[in-house]
Structures are given as structure tokens and as C-alpha cells.
Image (cartoon, rainbow, N blue to C red):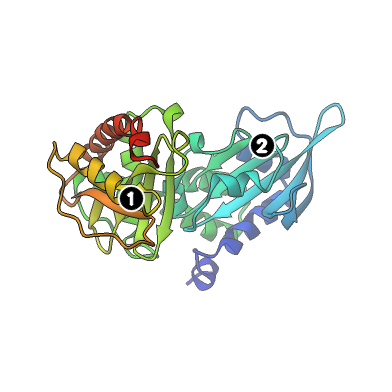
Amino acid sequence: MDWVQAVGYQHEVVHTGVLEHLLNGESPVTVAQALLGDEAPAILSVEACEREKQVRRRRPIDLAAILRLPADRTFRLGVEVKVDSRWTYTQLTSTIDDGDAGVLLAVGCTALAATQSDLPPNWRFVGPAEWATIVEAHTNGDEALTAYARHVRDEAKSHERARDAVNAGRPVEQLRKGSALGHWAYFCEVVAHSALDPSSGSWERKTLISGPLLTRWIDRDDAPDCGVYIELMGHEGEDRELCVKCWADSDSLEALRDRVSRCLDNGAARPCRRLRRTTKSCTAWSITLRDKRPQDAASLCDELVSRLQVISLTLTDLQC
């Protein structure tokens, strides 16, 4: 057992510590340049590298540093490290200003729940494969760093195997959190196969006790008091479900649910139980994804969004 296994790969402090070590080491400029990618300006030096640092905003970020540029210019680098935990757009924008540079370093299942297009404009996504390459180039014979890089590379390979498996309909190897890797790999492939226009909305990811969720809102801004959305739900094991859900106040929710149900079932609303007065959301339609490949689920999602956009245009009839 090496030190990464002893501490636990899932602990973000392990990865933040390696990053801090490299940015305070022999080649901090090349490490920072690699994190920010080819489009980043030329960096002369890396200064004031600290963990849990506030970067002009009130919420601290996992690691921050000052980057010195030519012509006596500087800007700040902020790195948010994630292993298997949730990230949000708001979380990122609350840590650094628009004029600074952010990096979402996702070295666990979180890497399957984010893409570059999901991030704020001044943020860059770095997953386990890219991070492993950066660390491997700077081990300099250090056995501890070499062992760490090997774990990150193994993580990247497990993601590749998981995506191949869900596309082929095979079981996914379990990782740290049971079936989480399989669900996030499946959802990642759904997003990759979807033909939905990114400008029409975005995918939201979160994790509940019941499992991972992938959500797409339908014209959420057009009807602030009610609406519909699709949600892919990961359950225990390999079971997954695609649902259409509604949200509204108690006076309109049942009417909205029945209307959506009739539309999706060609005029025949599904039998549904009466809702409690305190209920704010409910399921109008659902289908199991147990025997469906990600590309099939993506096609279903695209079709549902197209049909639901028509429904959402007439929500005012329900006086939501």
C-alpha cells in the first residue's frame, strides 16, 4: 500500500497538496502553463501559492496563486479540486472574478459530470488523463509523485473503460462509490450523443441519496412559477430511469401533470394518485433505461425536449 491508498484517493486534500507541491517546485511556470492550456498568455513566474485562499471573492478556493506576465502584468489563478463531489456553475463564479483564470481540476467521477462548455468563460476543465500527464512530466524521479501519477492514470483508464462498457451494454466495474461510476459514465455518453442545441439550455448534474441525476429544464425562464423538465435518474446497481417532471404551485400542479401526461401518451393520461397540497413537483411520465444504450437515451431526451417545448408555450392556459 502506498501513501495515496493510505490517505484515500477520494480526499481532495491529496490532490490539492500535489498541485501546491508542483507550483512551489522546480518548474512552477510549466505546470501553470499546462493547467491553463495553449491559449494562456506567457507566464514569467508563479507567486503566493496558497491553499483555501480567497481570490477577491468571499468564498475561498482550494488553491490560488498570482501569475506574473510580461510588461509587469499579473493575474490570479484559482483551482477548484473535485474528486467525486458535485460542482455548480455558481460555485465557480463565486470564487474568482471574470478577469482571473480558473481551473476545475476534476480527478474522480466529477470529470464525467462536466465538460468545457459547461464552465464559465474564464474557467478551464482539466480531467484525470490531462492531470496525470502534467504530473508525470514533473516527477523528477520522486517515488511519491510517481505513485500518485499512477493512481490518477488508473482513474482516467477506469473512466474510459466505463464509457466503453455503457456504450456496449456491459456492466461497469465498481469504484469508490458503488454504481456511481457507471451512472456518470452513462450520463456522460448521453450528453455526448445528444443533438440538443447548447444555446437552448444546459444539463445540470447533482447527486441525491437515491443516486446521480442529470436534468434538463424546458424554457425555465418563460414561466417562472411553473414548468417541466426531464431527468435521468441513476438507482442502485445498473438501473436507470428517464422521467418527465412538473413543478408548480398546489393549485396548478395536477392539471399540469395530467396535460403533460396526455401529450406524451397520445391523449391517454396515465393513472396518477392525487397530490398533497404541499407537493411542489411530481412525475408525469417515465420509462426505464435498463435495456437502452446511451445513444438511445439521448435520442429519447432530444425528442422529449422538442415535444415539451410545445407544451411549455401554452402553460399560461393553466394560470400558473
Q: What element carries label 1?
A: helix
Separation of residues labelled 2 and 1 (CA atoms) = 52 Å
Residue 185 can be seen, yes or no = no
Quadrant housing residue 121 = top right
Q: How far from the left and from the top, in percent, is residue 76? A: 75, 41
Seen from the viewer's position, the closer of residues 7 and 261 is 261
Q: Give, as a three-letter code, the residue at label 1.
A: Leu
Q: How far from the left and from the top, in percent, is residue 110? A: 46, 52
Quadrant housing residue 267 = top left
Name the residue at 64% across, 48% down: 79
Residue 162, relative to residue 42: is it above or below?
below
Name the residue at 46% across, 48% down: 111
- Write down the residue under mark 1: 253
- Write down the residue under mark 2: 33
Q: How far from the left and from the top, in percent, is residue 306? A: 29, 30
Q: How far from the left and from the top, in percent, is residue 202? A: 44, 37
Name the residue at 32% across, 63% down: 276
Mark 2 neighbour density, 10 Å: few (under 14) some (14–19) many (20 or more):
some
Seen from the viewer's position, the closer of residues 218 and 252 is 252
